[in-house]
Amino acid sequence: MKVLKLALCAAAASLLTAGAASAAPDVAFNVGATTDYVFRGLTQNNFDPTAFGGVDVSDGQFYAGTWTSGVSWADAEVDLYAGYKPTLGPVSLDLGVIYYGYVNDTISYGNAAYWEGKVAASVPVGPATVGAAVYYSPEFFGETGDATYVELNGSTTFRNATFSGAVGEQMLDKNYYGVDSYMTWNLGVTVPVTDKFSIDARYIGTDDDAAIAGVGAQVDKFVGTLKATF
């Protein structure tokens, strides 16, 4: 994991170095609050509100960044990510890697921290954009073996509001509290309040296979998020 952290930091540094040699890279900050931090259909903060924030650096087709949020079973989640976004005709690709880190986690089995590789593609279809993504980890959360997440998603904008949704399947090599796979979906709308603030209202659901025994982490609820980007 330390090697991956160094690789991600090196990727961010290379963006800054490349920017110094040509044009300055783009830097964007975000901060916000949500009624529940939900990741792939499972609450990460015991169904309670939490705050989050991050920074993104991009230079041409390359990007890197970090993001942090409150979680109920650690002092904080801190993610690092980097990637490359080429285009092939009308298809936009996103090839990246994500490291999920946790500060002073309290889980009693395995290692909470893990990393994933990401391959995503999207294409415009009339007024909408449709896409698909695959995420793979050789050692998932809690050292539960390799894991794959596949997702289909789409979005469209109407009168300044962006409607979006996705459906995905999380597949685990090993049973995680009796679960080896489950489906999750979401549907919602993002509305800009100003040029820097936006509100997202979203319904997030899971199927019965996500009823992790003794944990009660699965979500079937509306989640509201306020976000500022600057």
Image: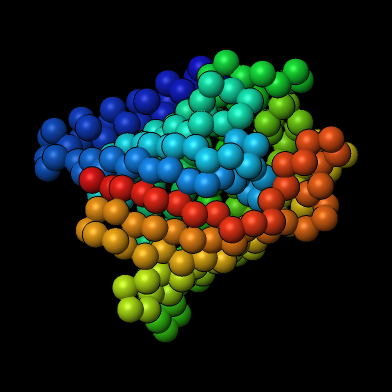
- Residue at 37 percent across and 78 percent down: it is 158
147 and 128: which is toward the camera = 128
- Residue at 38 percent across and 43 percent down: it is 32
- Residue at 69 percent across and 56 percent down: it is 220
47 and 160: which is toward the camera = 47
Give left or right: position of 11 versus 214: left
- Please, which residue is most extreme toward the bottom here? 126
- From the top left corner, tell me how far across and down residue 195 is, in percent: 22, 58
The answer to whether residue 110 is visible is yes
- From the top left corner, tell me how far across and down residue 163 is, in percent: 46, 71
The answer to whether residue 131 is visible is no
- From the top left corner, tell me how far across and down residue 208 is, in percent: 82, 55
195 and 81: which is toward the camera = 195
Q: Which image quadrant: the N terminus? A: top right
Task: Look at the picture and state if 210 lies above or below 205.
Answer: above
Quarter of image, res 52: top left
